[in-house]
Image: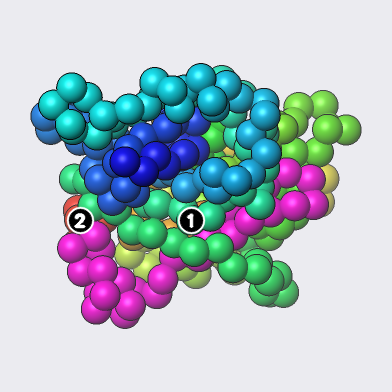
Amino acid sequence: METWIYLSLIPEALILSQLPPDKFGMYLAIGNRRQNESPAVFFEVDAAADLAAFRIEEAARRCVPHADGSPHRSIYVAVYNVMPRVPLEALKKAYLVTPAGFTLAVDPVEWRHEGDDRLFLYQELGPVYPRAVSRLNPGDFCRHVTDPAALVSLPRLAFIDLKLGPLAQDPDAEPSGLPYRQIDHLRDCLRSVREDPARMAKMVNRGLRPDVLYDLIRSGLYIGDGGRMRFFPLPGEDKLESEHYLWWHSARTVKGY
């Protein structure tokens, strides 16, 4: 029976499983007996990658079918400081799972700087979970947050960027139906990074765990450190509607903005 290696972001963990990605995503989101209902984000890790930092072989010996022949759902290999120890190039696909257990696979592409003068709203997905605004594009934001020369930095960061609509160009513009709570606070944060050249980012929400708002993702999922970054773009709404209808319908029912 095949075994997969997954890097989970919520919670951060390296996991071996005999479940393929779609079933593993459902297992993470709703549990074995539908006792849970929470979003999940994870990557499939290349088994041929250098994972010497982990006790993979020991975990693999334990990841065997149960006595009744059913697959082993999860063997946790590591639950602390996991992201920085998995090679970026080993991340094959990203999987976005709705609280109802529907899983969308996303392939990586090369990220290209858009070059426009805009503000950004980022939801960090690990190892910490604040929501922040910034005038830095995703590549520069990732580099800024993981800069070891900074007073406070992270070894690696995973995050998504969220839609700001007209507020990306003008914090005082009409929000045009944006569903965020405390829109005035969001405006104040955007003004702060717009008007202060020394401020690269400002925290909007310190949340202990993230709200994963798939229908508000502007471009996709990012993970990186320093000058290195992998980008997993979310398909456009037309493609989601036509090719991934069940996932898209499920994603749009999630609230908690």
Residue 86 visible somewhere in the drawing: yes
Residue placed at 31% from the left, 41% from the top?
A: 1
Q: In which quarter of the image is residue 87?
A: top right
**Mark 1 belongs to which amino acid?**
Lys
Q: How many marks?
A: 2
Q: Where is residue 150 in the image (x, y as percent from the top left)?
A: 83, 32
Tell me how far mark 1 sits from mark 2, CA to CA.
21 Å
Task: Locate residue 219, reporting x and y percent.
Answer: 51, 65
130 lies above or below 113: above
Q: Which color scheme does this rendered protein use?
A: rainbow
Q: Which residue is drawn at 72% across and 32% down?
A: 155
In the displayed structure image, the side of residue 178 where residue 94 appears, left or right: right
Is 228 placed left or right of 230 in the picture?
right
Residue 225 x %, y %: 73, 44
Image location (x, y in percent) of residue 112: 68, 71
Q: Quadrant of the C terminus?
A: top left
**SS for callout 2:** helix
Mark 2 lies on residue: 250
| Image-quadrant location for residue 115 | bottom right
Given residues 59 and 228, the one toward you in this image is 59
Residue 237 shown in magenta: yes
- Secondary element at tag 1: strand
Which region of the structure is painted magenta?
A: 222-248
Q: How many neighbours does mark 2 have within 10 angstroms: few (below 14), some (14-19), or many (20 or more)?
A: some
Write the residue at 79% across / 45% down. 226
- Amino acid carrying label 2: it is Ser
Would you identify the image quadrant in which residue 110 lies?
bottom right
Which dot marks residue 93? Answer: 1
